[in-house]
Amino acid sequence: MSGEDWRCPAFRENIICKLHFWSPYKGPEKISWAKALENHLFRRSRSSEEYLNLFSKVLDHYKSLAGKSGGSLPNTQCMETDLLAALENMNIEGTANPNPHMF
């Protein structure tokens, strides 16, 4: 991957598809949540490494929650709270959020 491939729409759409697959939501909310989450990760990232690292952390979080619930994802309210907590932890771990009012 070249330095700017992570910014192209096709690459970002691939990330959205992966987030969509692991999303706890059903129906139209599932698509909009995946797009909103990817957009949040994209805007926070200054490089492809940072973007993929944030994506990896979110994906690991989804997978760990799915594993704890026996393969199915838990209810969406708990998942949303847990995901927001995970995003806040990313901020604490050294990735400064340029807009603290987002997510």
Image (tube, helix red, strand yellow):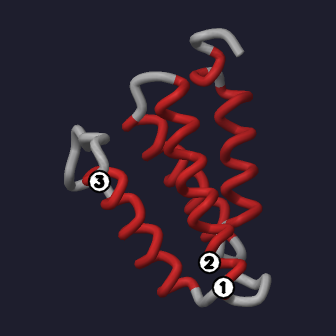
Q: Point out the frontmost of discs 3 and 2.
A: 2
Observer-nearest of 37 and 1: 1
Q: Secondary structure at mark 1?
A: helix
Q: Earlier in the sequence, mark 3 or mark 2?
A: 2
Q: Nearer the viewer, residue 11 or 54?
A: 54
Crowdedness near tag 1: few (<14), some (14–19) or many (≥20) residues, C-alpha within 10 Å: few
Q: Quadrant of the N terminus?
A: top right
Per the rendering, the mark at residue 102 is 3
Task: State the image coordinates of residue 98 (x, y, percent, origin top left).
Answer: 23, 38
Residue 55: image x %, image y %? 57, 46
Which amino acid does the dot numbered 3 rest on?
Answer: Met
The residue at 59%/89% (across/down) is 75
**What residue is shown at x 56% (from left), y 62% (from top)?**
33
Real-space CA distance between mark 3 and mark 2, rounded to the nearest whole angstrom: 23 Å
Classify mark 2: helix, strand or loop: helix
Dot 2 and dot 1 residues touching (CB under 8 Å)? yes
Which residue is label 1 attached to?
68
Looking at the rendered structure, the number of numbered marks drawn on it comes to 3
The one of 53 and 75 positioned closer to us in this rendering: 53
Q: Is residue 18 above or below residue 28?
A: above
